Image (spheres, rainbow, N blue to C red):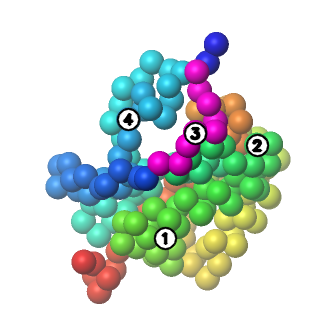
Amino acid sequence: MSSYSPEQPATSPKAPVVAGGHTRIRPFNTRDTYPEQNLDNDLCQAVVAGDTVYVRGQIGQDLDTSASVGIGDAAAQAEQAMANIKMLLEEAGSRMEHLVKLTIYLIDPRYREAVYRAVGRWTKGVHPISTGLVVSALARPEWLCEIDAVAVIPKEERA
């Protein structure tokens, strides 16, 4: 029996940490995020390395509560993933208009149109490059799509 509860209380994100000279945004450990699995990996939601921001694959999950969003609805999950990407880019000192690459993972090619329409609303006028993949599964069975991103922080916007 799994001890995972999709409705967890809201928590404040952990402060960024610096490791290897790079800023780690919203650090976490997988033993907390996947308590039903025997994992112990220190990860984060985004890394700022120089003027580049790498955003971990985002899914239909509220980052503050870990609650799944849009169960059974690929478009709603893509909307949540893109909202997470926007929030993480802003926390890292970048913005959506500075996106350069998206990778979109789908568990079923029939979700492509709905997911890409949602993504398109968030990237209108930005023109990032994009790669789409169909995979057999994601980390949890309720997740239908996952989106990771790479963006830059323009020199004039760096702190």
Q: Nearer the viewer, mark 2 or mark 1?
A: 2
Which residue is tagged 1?
99
Q: In front here: 105 or 89?
A: 89
Which residue is tagged 2?
71
In the rendered image, residue 100 lying in the magenta stretch gets the answer no
3 and 4 marks in contact (CB < 8 Å): no
Which residue is tagged 4?
29
Q: Furthest residue to the top?
A: 1
**CA distance for labels 2 and 4:** 24 Å
SS under mark 4: strand
SS under mark 3: loop
3 and 2 marks in contact (CB < 8 Å): no
- The answer to whether 51 is drawn above or below residue 2 in the figure is below
Q: Could you tell me which quadrant the N terminus lies in? A: top right
Q: Nearer the viewer, mark 3 or mark 4?
A: 3
1 and 3 marks in contact (CB < 8 Å): no
Crowding around mark 4 (Cα neighbors within 10 Å: few <14, some 14 to 19, many 20+) is some
* Three-letter amino acid code of the residue under disc 1: Leu
Q: In front here: 104 or 157?
A: 157
Occupied quadrant, residue 109: top right
Q: Which residues are magenta?
A: 3-11
Residue 130 in percent (x, y) is at: 58, 61
